[in-house]
């Protein structure tokens, strides 16, 4: 896609700090560097986000993820890693070409957090929601 910044990176029109590339995917360091080594993994096929991925694009993209994450962790000495995908604007997606963030984690004080609200689960409601979702996934 002509006006997509990630497509321009793939074509070489915009430079990037590549950490992995093959015929199907590209991984490169994110300019924001939320933490040292923050990288993005993208399919070379333009697709808006994970919600729009075909099974084939998802398989080729996600099958590379563990190898890239392990190399990134080893190279940076990170203790762990957040692997995040934001699909659609409401979820924080700002570039509309599918991408997965790999955010190395070094300590509790590395300026990145994912906050979850902990509360007593409603098992009946969870069961009903699970059934509803399962029906849609099966279609």
Image (spheres, helix red, strand yellow):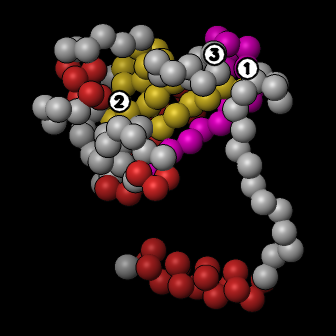
Q: In the image, 103: left or right of 125?
A: left
Q: Toward which corner of the image does residue 12 lie, by quadrant?
A: top left
CA neighbours of label 2 inside 10 A, class few (<14), some (14 to 19), many (20+): some
Q: Earlier in the sequence, mark 3 or mark 1?
A: 3
In the image, the segment drawn in magenta is 71-87
The spot of residue 53 in percent (x, y) is: 33, 52
Circles 3 and 2 in contact, beta carbons < 8 Å: no
Local secondary structure at mark 2: strand
Q: Say the numbered circle drawn on residue 78.
A: 1
Q: CA distance from mark 3 to mark 1?
A: 9 Å
Q: Toward which corner of the image does residue 69 lie, by quadrant?
A: top right
**Residue underneath mark 3:** 36
| Residue found at x 32% / y 43% | 96
Local secondary structure at mark 3: loop
Q: Say the numbered circle drawn on residue 108.
A: none
Residue found at the far right of this picture: 120
Q: CA distance from mark 2 to mark 1?
A: 23 Å
CA neighbours of label 1 inside 10 A, class few (<14), some (14 to 19), many (20+): some
Can the viewer see residue 121?
A: yes
Local secondary structure at mark 1: loop
Q: In the image, 45: left or right of 127?
A: left
Tell which tag, 3 or 1, sits nearer the viewer: 3
Q: In the image, 117: left or right of 46?
A: right
The spot of residue 117 in percent (x, y) is: 78, 60
**Residue underneath mark 2:** 25
CA neighbours of label 3 inside 10 A, class few (<14), some (14 to 19), many (20+): some
| Residue found at x 83% / y 62% | 118
Q: Earlier in the sequence, mark 3 or mark 2?
A: 2
The spot of residue 132 in percent (x, y) is: 53, 85
Q: Earlier in the sequence, mark 2 or mark 1?
A: 2
| Residue found at x 24% / y 40% | 46
């Amino acid at each position: 896609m002509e006006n997509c910044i990630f497509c321009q990176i793939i074509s070489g029109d915009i430079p990037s700090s590549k950490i992995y590339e093959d015929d199907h995917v590209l991984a490169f360091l994110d300019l924001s560097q939320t933490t040292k080594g923050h990288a993005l993994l993208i399919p070379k096929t333009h697709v808006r986000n994970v919600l729009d991925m075909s099974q084939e694009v998802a398989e080729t993209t996600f099958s590379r993820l563990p190898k890239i994450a392990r190399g990134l962790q080893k190279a940076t000495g990170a203790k762990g890693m957040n692997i995040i995908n934001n699909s659609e604007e409401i979820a924080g997606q700002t570039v509309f070409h599918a991408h997965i963030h790999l955010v190395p984690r070094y300590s509790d004080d590395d300026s990145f957090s994912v906050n979850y609200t902990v509360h007593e689960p409603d098992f009946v409601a969870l069961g009903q929601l699970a059934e509803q979702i399962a029906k849609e996934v099966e279609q």
